[in-house]
């Protein structure tokens, strides 16, 4: 999963010793609405999520999944069993009723919620035997039936943050339900999509087309890249859309590669320079550097969320690469909280935490 046992051990020790930024990150998580023992989940049988809108169940599902993950972390780090019980309450509530997702944003909705569900379930299942076997199996069945069909759908011509977020959920679910075939498919999707999303000069004059898609001419690629026709190392397919979606893609890429790393597969290595370039390129402008005229007409939307900790941790602390701009951005954001979608508490879990062991 995204965080391994040795990393959780390090987090416990740092929080216990009052070390920063982990202590402040833990307190931010503990005092958040997601960390309350009075948190009330709102499970639904069907979650319909049309584009750009949706009923309350769309928001509730994403929030409940983050709450389950938050409670699982609070139990694992702080030791209060009440948080494990709350995580189980939330997960059981959903697995007893959830059947399907509908409408146009089903792929993103299942990606965002599914990734958090898998992380929460993995932590609780690994160390809390009071989550009964029958309940665990019911939760696994929910993930297989109500999430996997959507997150494994083919979306080659969609904006790339879709497939990366979907793969984030798919690989996390694969680890939790112990599905080797799904795990292998998720590795392949990462290997194909990341080079088509983040550009390097070694790709040639044009970005790589999205795998299996129709964006395969200079004109189509320029339109797909939101009007951008000059390509520089680290540029992303959605850079000229906004940095919020770039952040989603950076976070998802880090989650996928980290989950694979915890399972003994190195996805980082072959994409390290691409990820480093993308992180540095966007961090520089997110921090305030003026965009040159060739980049998005000189205007960029600096809306990146708390999205860099996982990839930064690996590239800097395991591979010893230099990422000065990304380090500045991470330090400015710390202690990073949650985007209320699928990124949560990653200063706590991954800031300067390179430990590697078996997955939780």
Image (cartoon, rainbow, N blue to C red):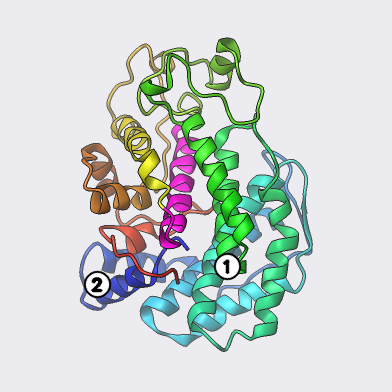
- The C terminus - image quarter: bottom left
What percent of the width, then of the height, locates residue 188?
A: 56, 44
Q: Residue at x 25, y 78 (%)?
A: 16
Residue at left 56%, top 76%? 87
Find the distance from the CA under tag 1 to the CA under tag 2: 27 Å
Q: Residue at x 48, y 40 (%)?
A: 249
Q: Is residue 307 above or below residue 192?
A: below
Residue 252 in the magenta stretch? The answer is yes
Name the N-terminal-most of marks 1 and 2.
2
Q: Nearer the viewer, residue 19 or 262?
A: 262
Specify start and end residues of the magenta stretch as a single range.
242-265
Give the number of the mark in front: 1 or 2. 1
- Labelled pair 1, 2 in contact (Cβ < 8 Å): no
Q: Residue furthest bottom?
A: 130
- Judge from the rendering whether residue 319 lies leftward or rightward of residue 255; answer left or right: left
Q: Residues within 10 Å of mark 2 (few under 14, many from 20)?
A: some
Q: Which mark is residue 176?
A: 1
Which secondary structure, mark 2?
helix
Q: Is residue 82 left or right of residue 335?
A: right
The numbered mark at residue 279 is none
Identify residue for label 2: 14
Asked whether the viewer can see residue 36, the reply is no
59 or 222, which is in the foreground? Answer: 222
Q: Where's residue 259, x and y in %?
A: 46, 58
Q: Nearer the viewer, residue 123 or 83?
A: 123
- Position above or below: 138 against 250: below
């Amino acid at each position: 999963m995204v965080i391994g046992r040795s990393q959780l051990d390090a987090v416990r020790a740092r929080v216990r010793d009052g070390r920063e930024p982990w202590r402040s990150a833990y307190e931010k998580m503990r005092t958040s609405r997601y960390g309350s023992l009075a948190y009330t989940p709102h499970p639904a049988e069907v979650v319909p999520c049309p584009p750009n809108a949706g009923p309350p169940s769309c928001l509730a599902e994403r929030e409940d999944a983050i709450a389950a993950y938050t409670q699982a972390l609070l139990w694992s780090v702080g030791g209060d069993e009440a948080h494990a019980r709350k995580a189980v309450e939330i997960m059981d509530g959903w697995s007893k009723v959830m059947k399907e997702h509908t409408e146009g944003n089903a792929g993103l909705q299942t990606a965002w919620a599914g990734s958090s569900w898998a992380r929460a379930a993995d932590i609780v299942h690994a160390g809390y035997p009071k989550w009964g076997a029958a309940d665990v199996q019911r939760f696994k069945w929910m993930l297989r039936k109500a999430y996997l069909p959507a997150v494994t759908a083919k979306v080659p011509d969609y904006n790339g943050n879709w497939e990366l977020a979907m793969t984030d959920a798919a690989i996390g679910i694969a680890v939790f339900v112990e599905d080797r075939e799904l795990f292998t498919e998720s590795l392949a999707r990462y290997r194909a999509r990341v080079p088509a999303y983040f550009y390097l000069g070694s790709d040639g004059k044009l970005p790589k087309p999205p795998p299996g898609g129709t964006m395969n001419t200079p004109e189509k690629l320029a339109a797909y890249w939101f009007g951008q026709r000059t390509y520089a190392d680290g540029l992303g397919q959605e850079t000229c859309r906004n940095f919020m979606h770039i952040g989603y893609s950076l976070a998802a890429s880090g989650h996928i590669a980290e989950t694979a790393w915890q399972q003994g597969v190195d996805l980082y290595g072959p994409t390290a320079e691409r990820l480093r370039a993308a992180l540095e390129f966007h961090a520089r402008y997110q921090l305030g550097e003026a965009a040159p005229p060739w980049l998005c007409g000189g205007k960029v939307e600096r809306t990146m969320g708390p999205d860099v900790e996982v990839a930064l941790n690996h590239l800097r602390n395991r591979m010893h690469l230099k990422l000065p701009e990304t380090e500045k951005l991470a330090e400015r954001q710390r202690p990073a909280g949650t985007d209320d979608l699928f990124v949560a508490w990653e200063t706590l879990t991954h800031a300067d935490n390179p430990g590697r062991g078996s997955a939780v």
